[in-house]
Amino acid sequence: MASSLTELIASQDDLVAEAALALPHSFSHCTYSLGSLRQAVYLCLTCASPRGICSACSIACHTDHEQLELFPKRNFRCDCPTTALSHACTLHKTPEDVNERNSYGQNFRGLFCRCGRPYDPRTERETMIQCLACEDWFHESCLNLRERPSSRESSPAAEASTIQASDEVNGANEDDDAASEASSSGLPPPLIQGSEYESFVCGSCVSGIHTLKRYAGTPGVMMVVRDDLSSDWKVIGGTSAPDGDNPVEVLDEAVATNAGTKRPRSPSATADANSPESKRARASPGPASSSAAPCLAPSLNMIACKIFTSRDDVTLGAGDIFLTEEWRNRWCHCGSCRPSLESRPFLLQEEETYEPPEDPDSSLSLEELGMRALQRLPRDRAIDGIHAFNNMRDELVQYLRPFAQEGKVVGETDVRAFFEAKLEAARLARRDR
Ligand SMILES: [Zn+2]
Ligand SMILES: [Zn+2]
Ligand SMILES: [Zn+2]
Ligand SMILES: [Zn+2]
Ligand SMILES: [Zn+2]
Ligand SMILES: [Zn+2]
């Protein structure tokens, strides 16, 4: 896996540069007093499960504990200062009552995806994708995006060949996206690549959200489906021509035409037989309400309908959707489509994820900076980066521990010294290879 510290340092200079630029800062603020937020959450396996801690606490209070990063969780309040953890918080020193409003899904027990497996960054070969709605993480193979890799164990030999493959791709291809898709795990590219969509919602979430179900499989709302048990998985909703050789471009065109409007129907959206009829029927004012706006959603996709009417039968597909760029601007806002969107604000507006403020007196952690840099990377690359970043964090945390414990502000020179040592190590490692 291309995820050693060496790889990180060699390939992600901007992460290092950004971290060095924004310093100095301290690790002195737990987010507890801010209440429930969408924020990066860590599970401390040493302390308590199912509980979660904020990133400052993960660095300052649980330094030498075994931790698992769960990434952003919405409406979450740090558990570190609460009596649910026997370990005392070093940042928020008043003991607080147990948080009643946090919800702890299976991730807080160290389990992920619909298959309920534990996650080990050192052995996991697949990219995992986070559901926008439930915020759980899913294996690409569990989303039918690829075959399950033959072994989840990555032997040293497999690892070496992966790194080699990644170098080859990087050398031959200047397109970072394409390179990272192919390289992260030495696996062939998934059926839908990370660059083709913006957000993902898992099938069980879709089945509970009327408007997502309504749009599933229509243009810009891709699904992975098949005709029967013996057929190959294919992508619908990503192309207006079933066998088009460049589906992404075709889709972008359709999307661009509709951008910012209440989705007037494009030719691609009406491609289904019989859709204009059903459309007109829906659009005609019903007897119920005079203020009813016509529904402008594209005609239902029949495969998606079948999938959601027999949820326990996963022959045709799991009901997962992959939403393409600008998807929030394409919803119909009629009386039938609006309510299920309004009750989940993240479907209408991109959510804020807490990041510590940037002034020197605040608690912007190096880790937050790292995460921000990672978020700008293509998905596959990001997951490599995250593995590597976790390794680096562990080392950095050891290094910064005395500062955190004494509540001292970390100076730019302190962190620069750390990175210089790392870069030197990386240079040596490269020479050895
Ligand atoms: Zn905290
Ligand atoms: Zn702990
Ligand atoms: Zn704490
Ligand atoms: Zn899975
Ligand atoms: Zn979900
Ligand atoms: Zn509608």
Image (cartoon, grey):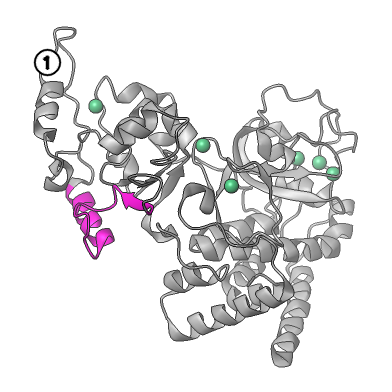
* Picture residue at 41% right of the left edge, 41% below the top: 317
Quarter in which the C terminus is drawn: bottom right
Q: Where is residue 354 drawn, in percent x and y? A: 59, 43
Which one is in front, 215 or 385? 215
What residue sits 15% from the left and 41% below the top? 272
What amino acid type is highlighted by mark number 1?
A: Pro
> For the magenta stretch, what is the residue range?
232-257
Q: Quadrant of residue 13?
A: bottom right
| Direction from residue 124 to residue 285 in the image, left or right | left
Does residue 297 show up?
yes
In this rendering, position of residue 367 left or right of residue 378? right
Tell me: is circle 1 under 8 Å from ligand 6. no
Q: Residue 320: x and y, percent?
A: 43, 41
Q: Assess whether residue 236 is covered by the magenta stretch.
A: yes
Looking at the picture, does residue 193 appear above or below residue 287?
A: below
Q: Looking at the image, is 11 positioned above or below residue 376? A: below
Residue 347, image quadrant? top left
The residue at the point 26 percent across, 19 percent down is 335
Q: Which residue is mark 1?
A: 285
**Quarter of the rendered structure image containing ligand 2:** top right
